[in-house]
Image (cartoon, rainbow, N blue to C red):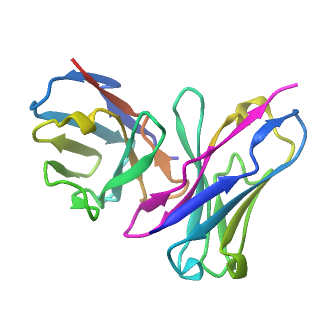
Amino acid sequence: DIQMTQSPSSLPASLGERVTISCRASQGISNNLNWYQQKPDGTIKPLIYYTSNLQSGVPSRFSGSGSGTDYSLTISSLEPEDFAMYYCQQDASFPRTFGGGTKLELK
Amino acid sequence: EVQLVESGGGLVQPGASLKLSCVASGFTFSDYWMSWVRQTPGKTMEWIGDIKYDGSYTNYAPSLKNRFTISRDNAKSTLYLQMSNVRSEDTATYYCTRWGLGALDYWGQGVMVTVSS
């Protein structure tokens, strides 16, 4: 199985700040990397697919990048609704696996 | 509007069976691959498995394939997860999801399953 390691697990940040969440795969995943956001009420929505493509309706302050084993999600300027959990997920091979999550908290 | 509504969760004893359902609306259910994903109380996300749009193919997490079965009824726009011989480690929130643009593009609100005697 491909292991996905996210860092940090917790990220205190302020409104307007630029933040980056990292996701490292245990082997190359050829950009088959997706990002999801989970709000405190449990609602989950997709943010980015195939490393850098924004899902419909996702604000442009979100961006994704990476290659090989290392990927990242960047939020350019934090808004109040961005404080949530974030998960990466690889699609390169079965079983599909998720990172452990990053909790983005208000500092 | 796309909606995925899960049901069938609750408290179940170890060793018992449970069947979750997910009713889909707002899209042509028979056009899409569907999946189940679960989230443990510790917030770990685990992919359970996929089912092809016509139900002819399924794929499972190796650790679950001997106990969990995914099926669908396209006439009822409903996805199912049959869980057998449940264990305490199956305690989780179970999400019904749709495969869209190269990712899980819609998620249900989740249904809780607690395995305890």
Q: Is residue A15 visible?
A: yes
Q: On the rendered structure, is B90 left or right of A59?
A: right
Q: Magenta region: which residues?
A: B94-117
Q: Is residue A2 visible?
A: no
In which image quadrant can residue A52 be found?
bottom left
Residue at horizontal 65 percent and vertical 82 percent from the top: B54
Percent position (x, y) of residue A15? 14, 28
Residue at horizontal 34 percent and vertical 34 percent from the top: A84
* Along the viewing direction, whichever of A70 and B46 lies nearer the viewer: B46
- Relative height, residue A83 to residue B22 (above, below): above
Question: Is residue B58 within the magenta segment?
Answer: no
Q: On the rendered structure, is A77 left or right of B15?
A: left
Return the residue found at the far top: A107
Q: On the rendered structure, is B46 left or right of B62?
A: left
In which image quadrant can residue A86 be found?
top left
* Along the viewing direction, whichever of A65 and B4 lies nearer the viewer: B4
* Along the viewing direction, whichever of B99 and A16 lies nearer the viewer: A16
